[in-house]
Image (spheres, rainbow, N blue to C red):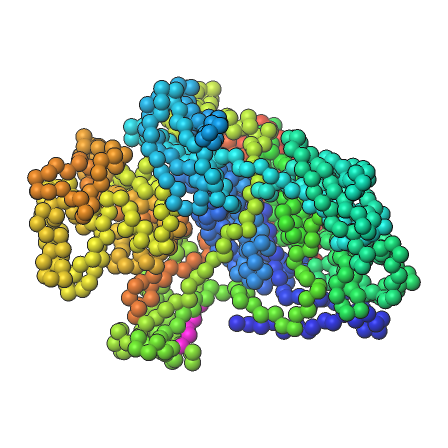
């Protein structure tokens, strides 16, 4: 583990020992920030998320100062499960890639998360996250309406009415549902809807921190329709009060900010008033933006102030303000465009007998260090030399203890974007040319890293309050807690927004650096990742001692890579590679001894690849933007217009099968929701608890083996178990048993397992589904036997414990030929259970793709029937500027006459964060 030694900085009150103003770096470890620019704000199922990654040094905001060369991108669902993960390699100073939204993805909110391995040293709360809604691209064949009623003696009930697309009721239909009120082990129930197409159930109590919902499946012939309905949570709200400088002082007029939010982190607005103990109204209060507001109040030493507030739903609550102090001091700051005017507030009748130290820094760069004399407790500080962002004012006493803090935000002039456009989006399939020039505020050409997206305004709503590169890097990434709509504070520079920004500084503390902690050395658990490195160790089977100078052969399954590595004195080894991920699969490596030592004498063990948890995600309610509803409705219609003719689409429903290799068909799926509720640790444990599967141990060719058994429908077919011997030499399933069970192979993401025990190396939470599959031709040939899984499950499941006697009739089922396990991250390759052979799957960097931009250079190409309904008209992840800060771009318009919005984001070479938005008509 590398250690970065950093000089300790001590802060003394004596003037001669204070830091010199400006330019020095505090004793903070090196940190990185990440940001993703996506092509639009929401997506449809089947879309592609195009993204550009920006990785900067957390202090300088320069990309050149960032050390990592790989960026991890994750797509996370509402249950905080990572369903896609990619590693992006820096190519020519750029990180760009894409995330496909497969057709089987659920309509829901998702979060994209970006981080480097080095960023894990600061914790998951420092990762970049962006919530993105994904909407269905077809109208649902199932509509679920939920209502609530109460029974005075039995609690609250929910009534769900299920309707078809045409409004008719699903009466008498078979439904399976689960009410999620705890993390695991929620029960699935099976019922039929009543004559009104309804199911009714009692709402149980939920565990704290669990988001409750109903997950139901409605079975209609060979189709299954699924819905997830989120239930209302217990409504509570709190109001926090934050005196300026950190302490409410006795006998002093002081600014107090407040923030109101619910127990689930949602923003609410409140109004009310503050009373003293004599019930005198001292001041009224009202939220101004995002539940935040402020007021000025004076508290007496012996007094207790209480705020009585009411939310916008009329719920009234009372909160006690912090007790007024006679021993603390507070730092108050008034800011104007050119200066910050500070004043040290003291309680009434308190005389100061010491001087203080004032330290000001922005992202760890010291801007000012001075002694504040007790004889002059106020002064003004020019802001012209301050960088853009949050300036942190910290007041120290003689013992270098922090006594008060205050944050202010310093704005700087934006970069100048000059854009000339030739062409109009009002014309279909016509070329549009653009000339772009980017200058600094002194009108000098800039160089940097920029990306551009152009979207159709009819489809994509451009929300001015959505987080973007400026609000993320300058504001959101440096504050504690959740900042609601951070881009709002950069939408303009009106006095109202400036006031709201100041209130935000009062209610959110600094989170990235702690000046009260001086670090002598920084120890990093997670290193900077500049190459793809794999590590492990070798040890003896006998005494478990590490084996030094042990030669190992590393190779890939296709033998495209071979390398001899030797363990060091500690028995550790490592190797690097430059492989690229192929078709979202892990790169497989085989590692075994290169010498002639017997395999039973040693074991090869790999350092487990761990990924960050997903506990710090914050979810907000997302509604379809008003401007985008017409577009969403149009794509969900049952037909499209081609040359004026209505072309009808077949209804899309969710079937029980997943995509499998050609020639295979799945007729039964243990779906993700059920797998999650089983709550097992390994995939092998999960398989043991799967209905109609038996994991059995036996001896074959004198080797202990574990294999999977499924019910055998072919009674006259000789069972494969005649080749398997038990420990006593007899068949492990003797007599009539072998007529009812058959051994089948297990496939994981297309790879057939040689040893079932390898499933112990696959976590159960990584399993997406367990599928019973068979050859498609055999499935069709037996189509008259489609006794569905649902019907079969209602009978008694066949197990070793209750297998039928000789001559008994077995329920008619479709006999599986394979058990196919699908994982969330298409791992396929799982570790080997043989100690002397290490078989690992490694996440290599992802292959990039180019955004498809159709061209219509001729009149004939403009007459092609295929409709062009792009919502992202153009995506340019890597804009290259010449020495004059200029570049040229071009694209073709889509079929729909509309207006387009251009968004350009980027970072200049000197760390200036930039964004530009322009609508073209």
Q: Quadrant of the C terminus?
A: top right
Q: Viewed as shown, does residue 591 lie left or right of 302?
A: left
Position of residue 322 relative to residue 459, above or below, is below
Q: Residue at point 70% right, 42% down?
A: 319
| Tally of numbered tags | 0
Q: Is residue 416 visible?
A: no
Where residue 201 sits in the image (x, y, percent)?
Answer: 41, 30
356 part of magenta stretch: no
The image quadrant of residue 281 is: top right
Where residue 419 sits in the image (x, y, percent)?
Answer: 69, 41
Q: Viewed as shown, does residue 793 lie left or right of 880?
A: left
The image quadrant of residue 729 is: bottom left
Q: Residue at point 85% right, 71% down?
A: 15
Query: Considering depth in this image, is 863 or 345 the residue closer to the camera?
Result: 345
Where residue 588 sits in the image (x, y, percent)?
Answer: 36, 60
Query: Considering depth in this image, is 846 or 519 the residue closer to the camera?
Result: 519
Position of residue 768 relative to residue 162, above or below, is below
Which residues make up the magenta segment?
Answer: 571-576
Position of residue 373 relative to residue 239, above or below, is below
Q: Residue at point 52% right, 72% down?
A: 1
Tell me which secondary structure the magenta stretch mostly adopts.
Answer: strand
Q: Is residue 546 visible?
A: yes
Where residue 577 sits in the image (x, y, percent)?
Answer: 43, 65
Q: Residue at point 61% right, 56% down?
A: 33
Query: Considering depth in this image, is 252 or 22 the residue closer to the camera?
Result: 252
Q: Viewed as shown, does residue 791 lie left or right of 101?
A: left
């Amino acid at each position: 583990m590398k250690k970065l030694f950093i000089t300790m900085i001590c802060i003394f009150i004596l003037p001669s020992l204070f830091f010199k103003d400006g330019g020095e770096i505090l004793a903070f470890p090196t940190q990185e920030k990440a940001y993703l620019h996506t092509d639009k704000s929401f997506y449809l199922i089947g879309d592609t998320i195009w993204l550009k990654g920006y990785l900067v040094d957390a202090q300088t905001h320069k990309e050149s100062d960032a050390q990592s060369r790989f960026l991890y991108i994750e797509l996370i669902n509402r249950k905080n499960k990572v369903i896609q993960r990619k590693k992006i390699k820096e190519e020519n100073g750029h990180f760009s890639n894409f995330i496909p939204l497969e057709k089987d993805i659920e309509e829901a909110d998702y979060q994209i998360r970006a981080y480097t391995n080095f960023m894990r040293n600061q914790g998951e709360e420092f990762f970049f996250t962006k919530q993105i809604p994904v909407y269905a691209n077809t109208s649902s064949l199932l509509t679920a309406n939920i209502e609530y009623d109460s029974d005075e003696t039995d609690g609250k009930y929910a009534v769900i009415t299920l309707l078809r697309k045409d409004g008719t009721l699903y009466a008498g239909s078979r439904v399976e549902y689960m009410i999620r009120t705890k993390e695991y082990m929620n029960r699935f129930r099976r019922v039929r809807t009543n004559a009104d197409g309804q199911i009714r159930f009692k709402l149980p109590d939920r565990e704290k921190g669990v988001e409750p919902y109903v997950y139901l499946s409605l079975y209609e012939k060979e189709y299954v329709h699924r819905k997830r309905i989120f239930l209302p949570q217990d409504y509570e709200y709190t109001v926090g009060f934050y005196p300026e400088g950190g302490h409410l002082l006795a006998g002093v007029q002081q600014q107090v900010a407040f923030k109101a939010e619910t127990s689930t982190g949602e923003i609410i607005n409140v109004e009310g008033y503050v009373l003293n103990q004599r019930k005198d109204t001292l001041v009224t209060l009202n939220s101004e933006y995002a539940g935040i507001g402020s007021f000025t109040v004076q508290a007496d030493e012996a007094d207790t102030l209480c705020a009585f507030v009411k939310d916008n739903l009329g719920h009234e609550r009372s909160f006690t303000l912090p007790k007024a102090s006679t021993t603390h001091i507070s730092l108050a700051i008034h800011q104007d465009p050119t200066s910050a005017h500070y004043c040290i507030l003291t309680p009434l009748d308190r005389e100061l007998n010491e001087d203080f130290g004032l330290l000001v820094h922005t992202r760890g760069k010291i801007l000012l260090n001075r002694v504040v004399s007790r004889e002059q407790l106020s002064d003004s500080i020019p802001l012209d030399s301050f960088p853009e962002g949050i300036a942190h004012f910290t007041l120290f006493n003689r013992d270098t203890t922090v006594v008060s803090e205050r944050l202010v935000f310093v704005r700087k002039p934006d970069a100048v974007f000059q854009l000339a456009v030739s062409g109009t989006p009002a014309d279909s399939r016509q070329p549009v040319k653009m000339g772009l020039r980017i200058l600094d505020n002194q009108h000098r050409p800039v160089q940097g890293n920029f990306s551009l997206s152009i979207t159709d305004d009819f489809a994509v709503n451009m929300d001015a309050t959505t987080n973007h590169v400026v609000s993320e890097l300058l504001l959101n990434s440096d504050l504690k807690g959740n900042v609601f709509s951070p881009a709002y504070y950069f939408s303009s520079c009106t006095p109202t927004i400036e006031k709201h920004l100041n209130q935000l500084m009062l209610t959110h503390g600094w989170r990235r650096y702690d000046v009260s902690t001086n670090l002598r050395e920084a120890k990093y658990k997670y290193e900077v990742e500049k190459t793809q490195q794999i590590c492990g160790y070798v040890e003896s089977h006998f005494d478990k001692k590490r084996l030094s100078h042990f030669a190992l052969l590393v190779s890939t399954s296709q033998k495209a890579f071979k390398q001899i590595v030797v363990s060091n004195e500690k028995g550790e080894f490592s190797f690097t590679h430059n492989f690229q991920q192929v078709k979202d699969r892990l790169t497989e490596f085989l590692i075994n001894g290169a010498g002639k030592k017997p395999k039973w004498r040693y074991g090869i063990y790999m350092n487990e690849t761990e990924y960050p948890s997903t506990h710090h995600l914050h979810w907000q309610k997302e509604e379809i933007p008003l401007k985008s509803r017409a577009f969403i409705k149009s794509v969900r219609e049952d037909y499209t217009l081609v040359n004026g003719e209505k072309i009808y689409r077949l209804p899309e429903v969710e079937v029980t099968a997943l995509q499998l290799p050609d020639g295979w068909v799945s007729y039964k799926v243990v779906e993700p929701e059920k797998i999650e509720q089983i709550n097992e640790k390994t995939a092998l444990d999960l398989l043991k608890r799967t209905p109609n599967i038996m994991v059995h141990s036996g001896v074959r060719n004198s080797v202990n083996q574990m294999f999977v058994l499924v019910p055998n429908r072919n009674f006259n077919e000789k069972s494969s178990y005649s080749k398997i011997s038990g420990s006593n030499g007899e068949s492990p399933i003797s007599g009539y048993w072998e007529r009812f069970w058959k051994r089948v192979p297990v496939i994981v993401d297309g790879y057939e397992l040689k040893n079932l025990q390898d499933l112990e190396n696959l976590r159960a939470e990584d399993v997406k589904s367990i599928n019973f599959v068979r050859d498609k031709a055999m499935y069709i040939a037996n189509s008259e036997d489609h006794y569905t899984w649902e019907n079969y499950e209602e009978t008694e499941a066949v197990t070793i414990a209750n297998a039928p006697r000789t001559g008994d009739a077995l329920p008619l089922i479709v006999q599986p030929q394979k058990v196919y396990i699908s994982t969330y991250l298409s791992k396929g390759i799982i570790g080997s259970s043989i100690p002397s052979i290490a078989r690992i799957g490694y996440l290599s960097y992802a292959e990039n793709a180019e955004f498809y931009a159709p061209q219509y250079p001729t009149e004939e190409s403009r007459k092609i029937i295929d409709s062009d309904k792009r919502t992202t008209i153009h995506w340019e992840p890597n804009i290259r500027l010449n020495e004059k800060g200029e570049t040229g771009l071009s694209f073709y318009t889509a079929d729909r006459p509309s207006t387009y919005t251009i968004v350009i984001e980027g970072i200049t070479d000197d760390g200036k964060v930039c964004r530009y938005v322009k609508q073209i008509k």
